[in-house]
Amino acid sequence: MTTKNPLHIPSAFQADQPDMTPEEKEQQYVHSVYQAIAPHFSATRYKPWPVVEEFLKTMPAGYVGADVGCGNGKYIGVNDKLFMVGSDRSSNLICICGERGHEAMVCDGLALPYRPQFFDFAISIAVIHHFISPERRVAAIEEILRIVRVGGRVLIFVWALEQTGKRDFDKETQDVFVPWALAKKPTESKKSSDPKKPKANSRPQGVKKKDKKNKDGDSVAAGQATTVQREAKEEVIESTVTESLSKLTVREDHTDNQSIISSKNNSLQDQSSTADDSPSSTSAQTSTTLTTSAESNQPNSADTPAPEAVAAPVYNRYYHLFHKGELEDLVLQTNKATIVQQGYDRDNWWCILEKTRHE
């Protein structure tokens, strides 16, 4: 039975913090976290969910839509016959959208910079569960409805309390911290920076290339000589590769440590360079639970033992887990939309609503 890493297990969110406003809690436990993890988070978000993809592809050509809480913009280009604009609180994620050629801007989900009834449709995927209170969740839905014309449709996804996937949530606790670990890159962790690493099919020094004329077995002597050469070659290869692998283990750990520290430093540097999204210049350190080893790296050599691995930073994000029917209840509280369709997909509750009135 596999034992779960305690750093990856969700924990209860202590909502009773009278010294903090809802806005401050969201800044500390949501916005600052996504600023810090933006590059790694984006690397894990690349495949559209089927329900969202189908919703976008059924929209008529020429429709204008909004992706509220667009993240890295993975849904903006799903249907190239539409014109979509993205928005997100994380300037680091919006930069990634820009690098991909998407139209996107930094803004607050409760104060979208769009005219009323401007869009034909909108989507909000895995966003509203980050708002601290029921009132703010309703306000977020109302703001999305404000920018959509009457008759326009909105698709909303939120995390489910009843999810049965890889996470193990206490079904009695709806407000939780969900850890995000800045894991090592698996492709880079296995590579060595040693330029002298031998190729698996390389010919060791001192072993001559096999005589092509012997391929038809011209003589027994030639065959015997080839056998001796082959055995010598295999012996040298085995010795060389064994020695290289013993060195490679040390370099692998050293390379991993460097990459983790680089990732952490880049994340903190990105955080400090976006003061408009942070309550202070040290938001990435004060707004998140950051777990890291205090051990420093030492210069690597064949005679030096491998340095201890530095633990990957872990950040806690706030989530409100929706029970079945809760999202629909919030939509109906707006008195501005009806539920067209709802369902459960990928540990999320989702619903499609149609705007019926505008005030």
Image (spheres, rainbow, N blue to C red):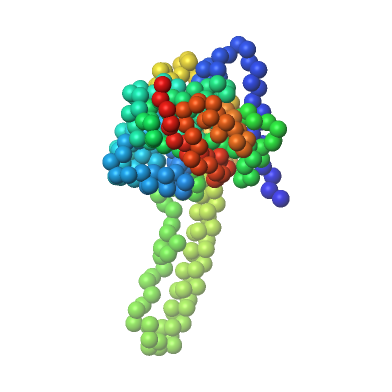
Tell which of 304 and 82 is nearer to you. Answer: 82
Which residue is at 50% across, 54% downward?
244
Left or right of residue 114, residue 267 in this image: right
Provide residue 233's location: percent of width, then percent of height: 46, 69
Q: Position of residue 288 (x, y in %)?
A: 56, 24
The residue lying at 46 percent from left, 82 percent from top is 224
The percent position of residue 344, horizontal first and vertical second, equals: 56, 44
| Residue depicted at x 41% and y 63% | 202
Q: Quadrant of residue 168?
A: top right
> The C terminus is located in which quarter?
top left
Relative depth, front residue between 204 and 167: 167
Is residue 216 shown above or below 37? below
Viewer-proximal residue among 55 and 186: 55
Of 237 and 178, which appears nearest the observer? 178
Please identify the residue farthest to the front as the structure is shown.
357
Residue 65 at x, y percent in the picture: 35, 35
Residue 120: quarter of image: top left
Horizontally, residue 114 falls left or right of residue 354, namely left
Q: Which quadrant of the structure image shows residue 229?
A: bottom left
* Vertical comparison of 351 with 231: above or below: above
Residue 63 seen anywhere in this rendered image of the structure = yes
Res 188 visible: no
Q: Which residue is drawn at 32% across and 36% down?
A: 64
Decide: is 343 above or below 109.
below
Horizontal placement of 291 versus 223: left or right? right
Task: Give the tally of numbered discs.
Answer: 0
